[in-house]
Amino acid sequence: MSKGRFITFEGIDGSGKSTQARLLAAYLKAHDTDVVLTREPGGAPGAEDIRRLLVEGNPDRWSPETEILLFTAARRDHLEKTITPALQRGATVISDRFADSTRVYQGAARGALRDLVDRLHNEVIGVEPDQTFIIDMDPGEALRRGLARQSGEDRFEDMGESFQHRLRDGFIALAKDAPDRCHLIDGARDPNEIAAEIARIATNT
Ligand code: ADP
Ligand code: TYD
């Protein structure tokens, strides 16, 4: 049985998830919480190796089916090595992306593969976050932010703005489907204002 709390951040590329995950981790740490800040794809050595296969290179490097298997393999490693041990010791785990990203990116935006995504999730992952913050924002603006970083990890950003519009719609639909778990957050504001809203929700104050 896990004693800790599992919080995830989701949204399109460049929406400000990583920034907000970091700010929430810092806020909770300042209030004496044991926090593990992690990310997907990645978050454990093996999963980080798989990450490089996924985020670098040509946009059509993998078929949608292969991509689902790679993301799920990385998630299983992340869960075994990082998330589950931390939750068992009572830590708060904050992950920059988790299974909702696969549901939206692979399940909704790249072919009608949601059923495969759900079956694999149930078979080998089987964990849902306690709370998910979906940072919502205009894809044009988010794309400009993301590409400005020049991280060399732009395989998904390179799929273009209409792809990002489909993703945004997918995340909004997901928030409607799981309203108890998901909080849709307006990301087109000052980062500190967004962080304050998220901290209020996360600490129920
Ligand atoms: P993501 O993890 O969703 O890709 P990041 O947190 O890395 O997004 O942010 C992408 C870029 O936008 C970064 O350069 C970051 O400094 C900047 N940024 C993040 N949040 C905001 C915000 N609320 N307003 C303006 N710029 C932001
Ligand atoms: P990430 O590093 O979070 O990118 P960004 O900071 O630009 O948002 O994730 C890398 C890419 O992988 C991102 O474009 C989203 C994609 N992705 C999926 O397609 N499926 C998944 O299950 C996950 C976790 C990420």
Image (tube, grey):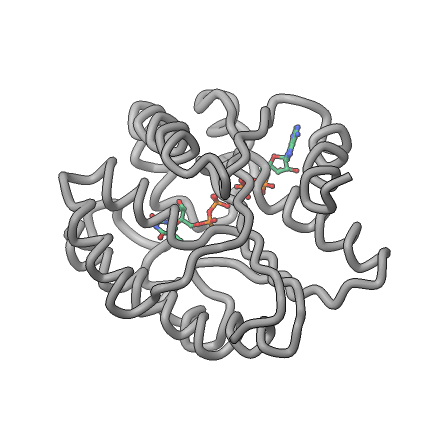
Give me the residue at 52% from left, 59% from top: 39
Question: x%, y% of residue 117?
Answer: 23, 53
Give me the residue at 65% from left, 66% from top: 36
In the image, 161: left or right of 87?
Answer: left
Give me the residue at 24% from left, 37% from top: 108
Kindly indicate the quadrant of the structure image that contains residue 178: top left
Question: x%, y% of residue 74?
Answer: 36, 68
- Which quadrant is the C terminus positioned in? top right
The relative height of residue 159 versus residue 98 in the rendered view (above or below) is: above
**Tally of numbered discs:** 0
Question: x%, y% of residue 154?
Answer: 41, 44
In the image, 48: left or right of 195?
Answer: left
Question: x%, y% of residue 46?
Answer: 41, 77
Give me the residue at 34% from left, 37% from top: 158
Front in this rendered view, residue 49 or 90: 90
In the image, 143: left or right of 102?
Answer: right
In the image, 68: left or right of 129?
Answer: left
The relative height of residue 133 versus residue 143 in the rendered view (above or below) is: below
Front in this rendered view, residue 99 or 200: 200
